[in-house]
Amino acid sequence: MKRTAVLLLAPLLAGCAENSSAVHGVSTAAIAAGLGSAGGPVVGLIAGVVAGYAVDEGVKYGEREIQDNQQQAIADSAGPLEPGKGGEWQVTDSFPVSDRRGMVEVARDFGETIPCKEVVFNIGDDPGFFTGTICRDRTERWRWASAEPSIHRWGTLQ
């Protein structure tokens, strides 16, 4: 009876909070505990928590990779531009994700030891604009240096 209740309750828990990895992890743990395992419900619960954590970290890694690809595409497009000039940026990965293109314009350049440029850009059809800084590294490649303002799209990648 307890197993049936846990199995019926777990999917309901998963629907309580949209995009909540913790709730999904708990529901995964509840299912694992309900089904039991060779070591009993406690081992099943631990296995479920570990599985939920692994899925959550995998999703976060994927999001960081997508953001890094977008930021590098912006830097690659803006690097050769002079101040006041603009162009289009686009991520050319084979993995399709929305909003992987936009426009970028160089607002100013600065620095001698570390040449940098301040850029203004947009993402897809989003009506907002964002600023960022790109700098040229020792290999002569332009790379992302910062992002302002820090918003949900960029998270902590500043």
Image (spheres, helix red, strand yellow):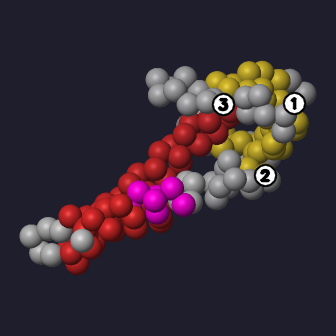
In this view, the mark in front (3 or 1): 3
Looking at the image, tell me whether mark 1 or mark 2 is earlier in sequence order: 1
- Snapshot quadrant of residue 132: top right
Viewport quadrant of the N terminus: bottom left
| Classed neighbour count for the residue bearing mark 2: other residues with Cα under 10 Å, few (<14), some (14–19), many (≥20) | few
The residue labelled by disc 1 is 83
- Snapshot quadrant of residue 144: top right
Q: Is residue 13 magenta?
A: yes
Residue shown at the point (67%, 34%) measured from the top left: 75
Give the camera-side residue of 55 and 148.
55
Kind of residue at badge 3: Asp
Q: Is residue 20 magenta?
A: no
Q: Which mark is residue 148?
A: 2
Residue shown at the point (74%, 55%) measured from the top left: 150
The residue range painted magenta reads: 10-16
Kind of residue at badge 2: Glu
Q: What x and y, as percent, mark residue 125?
A: 77, 28
Residue 109 appears anywhere in the view: no
Q: What x and y, as percent, mark residue 101?
A: 68, 26
In this view, the mark in front (3 or 2): 3
Looking at the image, tell me whether mark 3 or mark 1 is earlier in sequence order: 1
Q: Which mark is residue 99?
A: 3
Secondary structure mostly taken by the magenta-highlighted segment of the chain: helix
In this view, the mark in front (1 or 2): 2
Secondary structure under tag 1 reads loop
